[in-house]
Amino acid sequence: MNMFYLGGYDSMYFLVLIAFAFSLYAQAKVSGTFNKYSKVRNHRGYTGAQVAQQMLQNAGIYDVRVERVAGNLTDHYDPGSKTLRLSQSVYDSTSIAALGVAAHETGHAIQHDVGYAPLALRSMFVPLSGIGSKLSMPLILVGLIFGGSTGQLLLMAGIVLFSLAVAFTVITLPVEFNASTRAIRLLVDDGFLDTEEVRGAKKVLKAAAMTYVAAAFAAIAQLLRLVAIAGRRRN
């Protein structure tokens, strides 16, 4: 008997549901934490953009642009164009939450500048993950519909492609954790936040990190379920 198929039901389905619930909790947690500390102004009056620009200069990085981008929590660093984009709720904000997010994204720019290996690996996986995300599910669905040896081959091909997207979510974890560690250290060492304010920034970045853990957990759970389905069909 397949270990993932007991008593006539797909036990892996419950793992997927748990992962989904965890993802919802993580999203709610990051939104709630960010909203809480977005109302707390840092006592030195720095904006997110000022912090990012000063941190880059302190690190000897002068070829990275800091730009405003539309949306909420759409902050990111683009290594291709060497552009650090901060959302409207971060760029001009003086809140502790804004400084934490700005410092985190600056951490990614510093990773890029020093050649941080996991970031380079993640960048390499971006196109592979995109291909896997777009093609995996159509192949899996067609494989399930067709059945037989052809269907099984298509199903396995889809699973292999999906595993590329899963790998991307796992590789992302050390990149995000390291960026947050750098962010907190820079906020303290460069004197942007005091001890009490740093505690708030840590909570914001910890909540944000949870969303990446939840995404990786959900992707792995779905991959395991697909592998279990393929195993049952083969048997």
Image: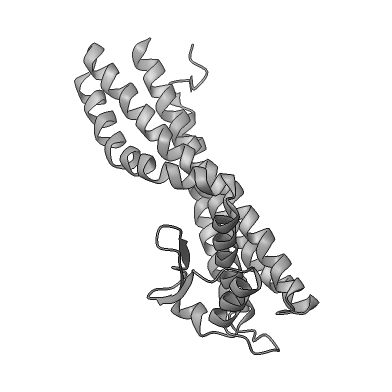
Residue at 40 percent of width and 62 percent of height? 81
* Position above or below: 66 against 5: below
Q: Is residue 36 visible in the rendered structure shown here?
A: no
Residue 88: % across, % down: 44, 80
* Position above or below: 101 against 94: above
Q: Nearer the viewer, residue 151 or 60?
A: 60
Describe residue 180's horizontal placement relative to residue 8 as left or right.
right
Residue at 64 percent of width and 54 percent of height? 178
Q: Nearer the viewer, residue 22 or 219?
A: 219
Q: Which colour scheme is used?
A: one colour
Determine the residue located farthest toward the right in the rendered image. Answer: 195
Q: How many labels does the image show?
A: 0
Q: Is residue 38 visible in the rendered structure shown here?
A: yes
Rendered-image quadrant of the C terminus:
top left
Residue at 49 percent of width and 45 percent of height? 122
Residue 168: % across, % down: 47, 42
Residue 205: % across, % down: 63, 64
Describe residue 200's horizontal placement relative to residue 148 as left or right.
right
Residue 46: % across, % down: 62, 86
Image quadrant where residue 143 sits: top left
